[in-house]
Image (cartoon, helix red, strand yellow):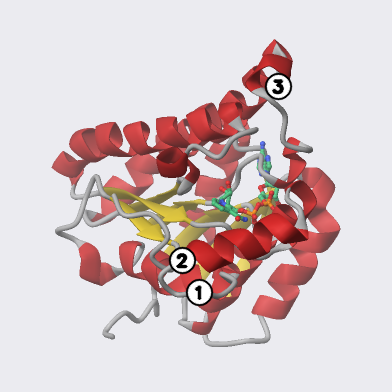
């Protein structure tokens, strides 16, 4: 695959989670210059992910603590990319509330605060990052935005109504942003992961549920963060310039849509 990241700069959110750390490492291995972000209270974990990434390859990463819901934080992250690396080529909107959702609950037991928190981070935060990055992406003429949805928008995942709704909104935002930012040459797509066997999923699902989901896939095994890497890197890279507004499901053939 011709998809070198040498000389490309990527803003990646949510690097303290298992999936974000995996993306970070693969981007740096491929030669990318990465501004890696996550909440300030994850600094130890995020800094160690960045330090490890910097031992892996030709690229380089720097950590910037940033809350995706805060306009000033996201502007600072974008400025770090343009000041440190001279450009911004891609935004990967990986951060979300997932791990922190707590146990699954019937929608009748969710509170307004639960809804507001999830929508604020997963939807408004994704928009906030797009808003901050769009001008710098446009400067290069071939910007890439990769949002992260979830297969739960297709299968409905009982007990997670607010999270499912938030990820459906991310798909809608992806299409709308694709229409608006396409004029500047920026593509906007979403990757929709299936249930990944990671710390976040193990915190909100039973082992039995994890095994049951794996058995429903066409490829009947646990899904790992590494399974997402090629789709994300293709959509964030130079070779996908005529693909926009799409949601690519990566779940081992579990749902077809
Ligand atoms: N793990 C799965 O099975 C699965 C499935 C489908 C989609 N996803 C999505 O993939 C992405 C990564 O998932 P994960 O399992 O690594 O999740 P995770 O919860 O472990 O990590 C998400 C990261 O986002 C960060 N974050 C949360 N709120 C933030 C904010 N306001 N500002 C900045 N950062 C914030 C967290 O600190 C965390 O490090 C998420 O978008 C998630 O919704 C995960």
Graded by Cα atoms within 10 Å as few (under 14), some (14 to 19) or many (20 or more), the crowding at tag 1 reads: some
| Residue drawn at the location 58% of the way across and 69% of the way down | 225
Q: Are marks 2 and 3 in contact (CB under 8 Å)?
A: no
Report whether residue 197 is seen: yes
Q: Are marks 2 and 1 in contact (CB under 8 Å)?
A: yes
Residue beneath disc 1: 220
Estimate the x, y position of residue 104 in percent, counting from the top left: 72, 36
Estimate the x, y position of residue 118 in percent, counting from the top left: 63, 28
On the picture, is 25 further left or further right than 177?
right
Residue beneath disc 2: 217
Q: Nearer the viewer, mark 2 or mark 3?
A: 2
Residue 98, relative to residue 112: is it above or below?
below
Graded by Cα atoms within 10 Å as few (under 14), some (14 to 19) or many (20 or more), the crowding at tag 3 reads: some
Report whether residue 20 is seen: no
Estimate the x, y position of residue 179 in percent, counting from the top left: 19, 35
| Residue drawn at the location 52% of the way across and 47% of the way down | 79
Residue 19 or residue 183, whichever sits in front: 19
């Amino acid at each position: 695959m011709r998809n070198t990241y040498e000389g490309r700069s990527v803003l990646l959110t949510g690097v303290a989670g298992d999936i974000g750390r995996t993306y970070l490492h693969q981007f740096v291995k491929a030669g990318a210059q990465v501004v890696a972000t996550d909440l300030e209270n994850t600094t130890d974990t995020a800094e160690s992910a960045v330090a490890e990434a910097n031992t892996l390859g030709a690229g380089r990463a720097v950590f910037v603590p940033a809350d995706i819901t805060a306009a000033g934080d996201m502007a600072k992250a974008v400025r770090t990319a343009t000041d440190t690396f001279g450009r911004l080529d891609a935004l990967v909107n990986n951060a979300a509330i997932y791990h922190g959702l707590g146990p699954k609950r019937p929608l009748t037991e969710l509170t307004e605060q639960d809804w507001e928190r999830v929508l604020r981070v997963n939807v408004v935060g994704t928009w906030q990052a797009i808003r901050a990055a769009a001008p710098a992406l446009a400067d290069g003429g071939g910007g890439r935005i990769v949002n992260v949805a979830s297969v739960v928008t297709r299968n409905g995942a009982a007990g997670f109504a607010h999270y499912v709704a938030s990820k459906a909104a991310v798909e809608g935002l992806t299409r709308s942003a694709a229409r608006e930012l396409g004029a500047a040459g920026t593509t906007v797509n979403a990757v929709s992961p299936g249930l990944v066997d990671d710390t976040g999923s193990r915190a909100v699902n039973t082992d039995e549920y994890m095994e049951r989901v794996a058995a429903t896939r066409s490829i009947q095994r646990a899904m790992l963060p590494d399974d997402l890497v090629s789709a994300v890197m293709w959509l964030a890279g130079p070779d996908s310039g005529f693909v926009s507004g799409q949601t690519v499901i990566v779940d081992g053939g579990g749902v077809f849509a």
